[in-house]
Amino acid sequence: MNFINEMIGLFSNVINITWQQVIMWVIGGVLIYLAIKKDMEPTLLLPMGFGAILVNLPISGAVDRYYQDGVWIKNLAEGKALFEAGTAGVTYEPGVIDELFNMGIANELFPLILFIGIGAMIDFGPLLSNPKLMIFGAAAQFGIFFTLSLASFLGFDLKDAASIAIIGAADGPTSIFVANYFGSNYMGAIMVAAYSYMALVPVVQPPVIKLLTTKNERMIRMPYKPATVTKMTRILFPIVITAITGIFSPKSVALIGFLMFGNLIRECGVLDSLSETAQKVLANLITIFLGITIATKMQAELFLTWQTLMIIGLGLVAFIFDTAGGVMVAKVINIFLPKDKKLNPMIGAAGISAFPMSARVVHKMGLKEDNQNFLLMHSIGVNVSGQIASVIAGGLILTMIGG
């Protein structure tokens, strides 16, 4: 009899499983499938997918839990409110993933450290060879501000709308930084949308580009004539960009500063071992922690809402209008250029921050129209400008909306 009672006790947690948690297990499985089978942002989608399963196990020790007189309070928000109010008999059991979240994301530490690794990976040479490409990086942030207005119109709180709009930055760390800064209630959905659409750039961008351009425009050749970029220029560039950004967009100085510090490590020429560590070991380590830690915001009661579907839709809108903004600016500039100096408007689409995927998409589309049309270096230059522009756009959002 004791054995039977022990077995019943062992499996008693099964009755705590909800259909919402089962759905989240399926969503986690889909993310893992996309990461492994489709090779879509595997370094982030796989930890997020596994984390989604982990945090949706009933009475999981991975996330914070609240109890009243020893009985688990299933509603997380209710339990937290009772505990913070000092209700008698309510106790709190910390979870390791929530602890990691508080130590690494709530204080923006993980995204900022990851920016050091990203900065160390980026070669700004193509942009420095042709600085006017920066305009396309700026133009491709149009989707952020359009989506901010649209999300507000649809009823989202202004700070949540701003957090959702940053999906259009196509920059995961910036999305995390801004959403956490504003304390958005939809961080899980924002992260899934941001990284999913980054992985889907080869699917999302080509139809938009084709819709906005003619075949003749897509066949425009742009000979690449690289200018010599001195070592001094490469070293001064991250310093000057940080200083200028800090003056005109103070809220973004941490983001741009860590990105440019990573690039300075790369370009200075005396810290090769640190540069290699930042690009590989540091970036990979932080990415692992970041992916699985974000999953705490993918608990069923936080994630399975109509707002999540709206956020995923708004993320797609942001990506579409980012792409359209870059292409249309290139088309407008072409009106004022002589025939032999025309730009291929497709390069404007590479202004989103999804590096280097967007540049590759543009290059492949150019080759498909004309197998001698090599746009890679131009699109790379635009793409790295998008890295800077997306961070500055995030800082502008923080400045405009406020803390």
Image: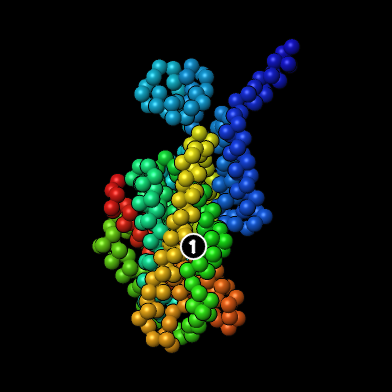
Q: Quadrant of the N terminus?
A: top right
When the figure is inspected, residue 57 is found, relative to residue 178, above or below; the finding is above
Residue at the spot x=50%, y=74% of the render?
Answer: 214
Residue at the spot x=48%, y=27% of the render?
Answer: 75
Which is nearer the eye, 51 or 151?
A: 151
Which is nearer the eye, 97 or 390?
A: 390
Outermost residue, bottom side: 340
Kind of residue at disc 1:
Ala
When the figure is inspected, residue 23 is found, relative to residue 249, above or below; the finding is above
When the figure is inspected, residue 381 is found, relative to residue 89, above or below; the finding is below
Outermost residue, top side: 1
Q: Residues within 10 Å of mark 1 (few under 14, many from 20)?
A: many
Which is nearer the eye, 394 or 328?
A: 328
Specify whether 70 is left or right of 388: right
When the figure is inspected, residue 177 is found, relative to residue 2, above or below; the finding is below
Mark 1 lies on residue: 354
Outermost residue, left side: 247
Q: Position of residue 41 (x, y in %)?
A: 57, 56
Q: Position of residue 194 (x, y in %)?
A: 49, 53
